[in-house]
Image (cartoon, rainbow, N blue to C red):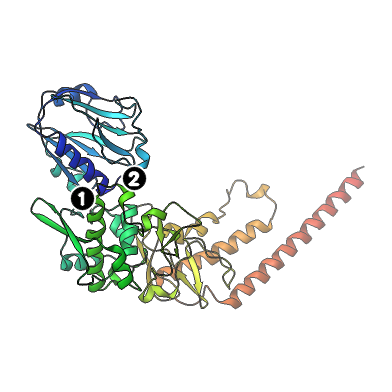
Amino acid sequence: MPELPEVEAARAAIAEHCLGKKIIKSIIADDTKVIDGVSPKDFEATLTGKTIVAAHRKGKNMWLELDSPPFPTFQYGMAGAVYIKGVAVTKYKRSAVKDDDEWPSKYSKVFVELNDGLEFSFTDKRRFAKVRLLDNPVAVPPISELGPDAFLEPMSVDEFFKSLSKKNIGIKALLLDQGFISGIGNWIADEVLYRVSSFISGVAASGLRIGAIRFEFCSDFTTVDHLNLHGARIHPLQSASSMSKETCERLLNCIHEVIGKAVEVGADSSQFPTNWIFHSREKKGKAFVDGKKIEFITAGGRTTAYVPELQKLSGVQATKEPQKGKRAKGSKNGKDHKNVDEVDGRDVIVKTGEKTSKGRSVSVKGKSKDTLNISRNDAVKDSDSSSGDEDPKNTSRKKPSVGNESKKTTTKKVSKRRKSLESGDSTGDDDENENNRDHKKAKKTKKNMMKQNVESNQNRRSTRKKAQ
């Protein structure tokens, strides 16, 4: 999907080839899902005759400044892309527009012809992009809601550390939050967490200047790896608030380093360093980088590539590392709750930073007495699904069944577990003796029900014989 480097490459191409030129023709697609809040006819009338003065970007959003407002803005979504006829602009996989396709593409949403004959088009095959006309794009959503741009507006180390210290969620989920820092997407987040390391003095470096800002990044990534990368990388689920100032500084430097390199090569992934995890992201099952196995978990709601051998949880979270984001299997007390694993006989929540359906993260204390984030939906899912409330009108018609009895027992156990999780109580619901008693009780109940059914059948057969 397009991230900051891809959008920056498009902005730079328009800035280089289109500034100072007048729009003599425009064709806007009749697609209300992408063209937001304005009719194609009005959009075309607004663009025609205007001169392109500048091209701007913040995060994954781009807008063209014309000689008078309103200005066209482009929110790229999952497959947005800019093409300039006759100009090589970086193409990424999901844009799905080939060089030999018809022009403009059937996926074109905004087509523009300039007074010197140059033509460009904004395309979107998957239709998740948004194109708008705004008088002041930076003053209204979505751009007004974005955090500082990860490339153009770098935070200071103190600002970054202070911000992270207040965020008790997984570091990858935080990096993907465009309201916290804009422009970082899935592959960049994975790359910086894998590559984060201490800077070594004397390693060759190069710089990239945009306006008055100069960005430094290491050009010799292989040298840095060989000098110092052991134990310096960050697990995607590591709590942001648990990170030291030194780690935050290294992470911030690596963000600048990775984005700077990607922008320098125009987002052309074939020119990314060969030892980047980027090149192995889609080789699931047999993915390796520098001889280390890559595994995949879910972090921040996204499929996440990381190297378990190098990226380890630290501090309190080091007790148990999540296993590919799957449900824990076969705990000692017979429980199999989603997002719960067992460590030394204690239930520990291992999936952090997830939001509830109402957008809130719920913090509870599990049996490990460590405060972790857990989705309330996940915590009570078993309870909700096994409530087993019967319709009072139909109870008289139903025969006793073991299933109903089991549901009641399960409801009591899960309800008790939920109370224990919310109150931080570390005793009671996991008592093995209590589980044994419940098991015996359920077994006895099942036996009684079977006996009653046998007797009932015998009585019915006896009644039929007498009637005959």
Amino acid type at image mark 2:
Met
Mark sitting on residue 403:
none
Amino acid type at image mark 1:
Leu
Find residue 177 and report its image quarter: bottom left
Q: Position of residue 317 (x, y in %)?
A: 39, 72
Q: Position of residue 260 (x, y in %)?
A: 22, 55
Q: State whether residue 426 is above or below residue 267.
A: below
Q: State whether residue 232 is above or below residue 35.
A: below
Instruction: Kindly state the secondary structure of the residue where label 2 is placed.
Output: loop
Q: State whether residue 239 is above or below residue 207.
A: below
Quarter in which the C terminus is drawn:
top right
Q: Is residue 30 left or right of residue 293?
A: left
Q: In this orientation, which residue lies closer to the viewer: 172 or 204?
A: 204
Q: Position of residue 250 (x, y in %)?
A: 24, 68
Earlier sequence position, callout 2 versus callout 1: 2
Q: Residues within 10 Å of mark 2 (few under 14, many from 20)?
A: some
Residue ID at (62%, 46%): 394
Residue ID at (26%, 58%): 258
| Residue at mark 2 | 1
Quarter in which the N terminus is drawn:
top left
